[in-house]
Image (tube, helix red, strand yellow):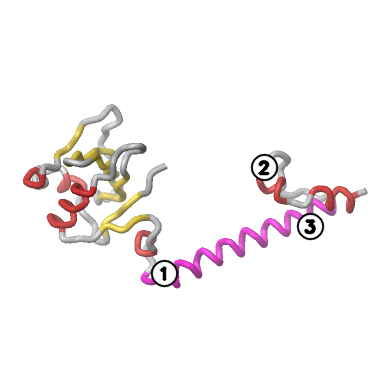
Amino acid sequence: MSTAYKPLFNIRFENIFDARLDKYEVREQIRTDTSDSTRYLAGPDGVLAVFSEQNGASSSFVRPSFEPMPWSTFDALNREFDTEFVSEHDHRFWGFDTAEEWDQFQNEITRGENDDFYIDLIRYARGEPNGLIPGTVGFKKSPRPLLMAMQA
């Protein structure tokens, strides 16, 4: 799976494909899955998939799997639309002002998931209905030998 990118400032989806990038040798490429919400930009060094939001903004940019990274296309977009692109590994991609805010959010999610897992673990040990389904990762994570011994 490829990494997603997005501009720090919204770019109108239709503006990306209005030929203003031609001067950078970046043009639309029609592919079999081209649609109203998914279009492609091809530059000298690769292709970039562009996805539209319902409000008409471009939501994300993704390099199709196993294709070269289209740096020249990103450079053209940066110059033409005066914005920076960030990857999904950057806190700004998700709307956080700082990396610390993003880390705190991730920790809260993890804490909540762990709390839910341990509640299910206790319910499983008591023989009560729970979310530990045999064959799932959650079930495999649970200390089954210990739990089975506790139930015996």
Q: CA distance from mark 3 to mark 2?
A: 17 Å
**Nearer mark to the viewer, of 3 and 2:** 2
Tell me, yes or no, whether the highlighted magenta stretch contains residue 102. Answer: yes
Q: Which mark is residue 41?
A: none
Write down the residue under mark 3: 122
**Three-letter code for the amino acid on which mark 2 is drawn:** Thr
The residue sitting at 6% across, 46% down in the picture is 23
Q: Which quadrant is the N terminus positioned in?
A: top left
Front in this rendered view, residue 75 or 40: 75
**Three-letter code for the amino acid on which mark 3 is drawn:** Ile
Q: CA distance from mark 1 to mark 3?
A: 35 Å
Q: Which mark is residue 136?
A: 2
The residue sitting at 17% across, 37% down in the picture is 28
Q: Is residue 2 left or right of residue 38?
A: right
Tell me whether the residue at label 2 lies in contact with that at label 1, contact meaning CB atoms closer than 8 angstroms.
no
Write down the residue under mark 1: 99
Tell me, yes or no, whether the highlighted magenta stretch contains residue 59. Answer: no
Magenta stretch in the rendered image: 97-126
**Nearer mark to the viewer, of 1 and 3:** 1
Seen in the picture, residue 71 relative to 118 is either above or below; the reply is above
Q: Is residue 57 left or right of residue 114?
A: left
